[in-house]
C-alpha cells in the first residue's frame, strides 16, 4: 500500500502531494508525532485522525511473542489455529451506591 492509498482510505488524500514531497512513506509515517504534523501545517482534526491511524498501523504490525510450541497427543507441534486464540481479559468490580452491603443483608432464602 502506498502513502497515497493510505491517506485516501482515511479521507485525507489532499495531503498525498505534501507527504510525497517530504518523502514520507508508510514506514516514516509510523514515526510521525503531533508536532511533526503541526509543522507540516495540518489542522488539529486531521492530525488527530492521522495519529489514530498511525497507532492502528503500529498495532497491526505488532506480533505477539510465541511462548513455545504445544505438542499434541501424537507428538507433533500444533499450529496457532489448533492451539486457539489467547486474549487479554480485564475485570472491573464496582460497588454501586452500597449495593453489595444491601445485598448481604437481604433475606433471599
Image (cartoon, rainbow, N blue to C red):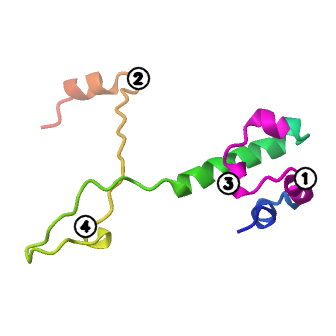
Q: Quadrant of residue 103?
A: top left
Q: Which residue is pictured at 31% across the width and 72% down the height?
A: 81
User: What residue occupies the far front of the structure in this picture?
Assistant: 23
- Mark 4, mark 3: which one is toward the viewer? 3
- Taking depth in this image into account, of 40 and 86 the one nearest to the observer is 40
Rendered position, 41 above or below 11: above
Dot placed on the residue nearer the N-terminal end, 4 or 3: 3
Between marks 1 and 2, how big is the CA–CA gap? 54 Å
Dot placed on the residue nearer the N-terminal end, 1 or 2: 1
- Mark 2, mark 4: which one is toward the viewer? 4
Question: How many residues crowd mark 3 within 10 Å: few (<14), some (14–19), many (20+)?
Answer: few
Highlighted magenta segment, given as a residue range:
14-38
Between marks 4 and 1, how big is the CA–CA gap? 46 Å
Residue 31 screen position, x and y as percent: 68, 43
**In which quadrant of the rendered image does the C terminus lie?**
top left
- Taking depth in this image into account, of 66 and 81 the one nearest to the observer is 66
Q: Which residue is pictured at 34% across the width and 32% down the height?
A: 93
Q: Secondary structure at mark 4?
A: helix
Rendered position, 93 above or below 9: above
Number of the label disc, if any, that sits on residue 27: 3
Q: Which residue position is annotated with label 1?
A: 18
Residue 73 screen position, x and y as percent: 8, 73
Q: Secondary structure at mark 1?
A: helix
Q: Which residue position is annotated with label 4?
A: 83
Amino acid at each position: 500500500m502506498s502513502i497515497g492509498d493510505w491517506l485516501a482510505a482515511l479521507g485525507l488524500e489532499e495531503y498525498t502531494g505534501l507527504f510525497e514531497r517530504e518523502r514520507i512513506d508508510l514506514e516514516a509515517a509510523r514515526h510521525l508525532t503531533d508536532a511533526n504534523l503541526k509543522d507540516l501545517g495540518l489542522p488539529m482534526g486531521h492530525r488527530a485522525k492521522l495519529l489514530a491511524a498511525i497507532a492502528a498501523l503500529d498495532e497491526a504490525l505488532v506480533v505477539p511473542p510465541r511462548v513455545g510450541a504445544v505438542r499434541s497427543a501424537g507428538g507433533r507441534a500444533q499450529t496457532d489455529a489448533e492451539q486457539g486464540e489467547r486474549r487479554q481479559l480485564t475485570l472491573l468490580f464496582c460497588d454501586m451506591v452500597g449495593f453489595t452491603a444491601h445485598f448481604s443483608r437481604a433475606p433471599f432464602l
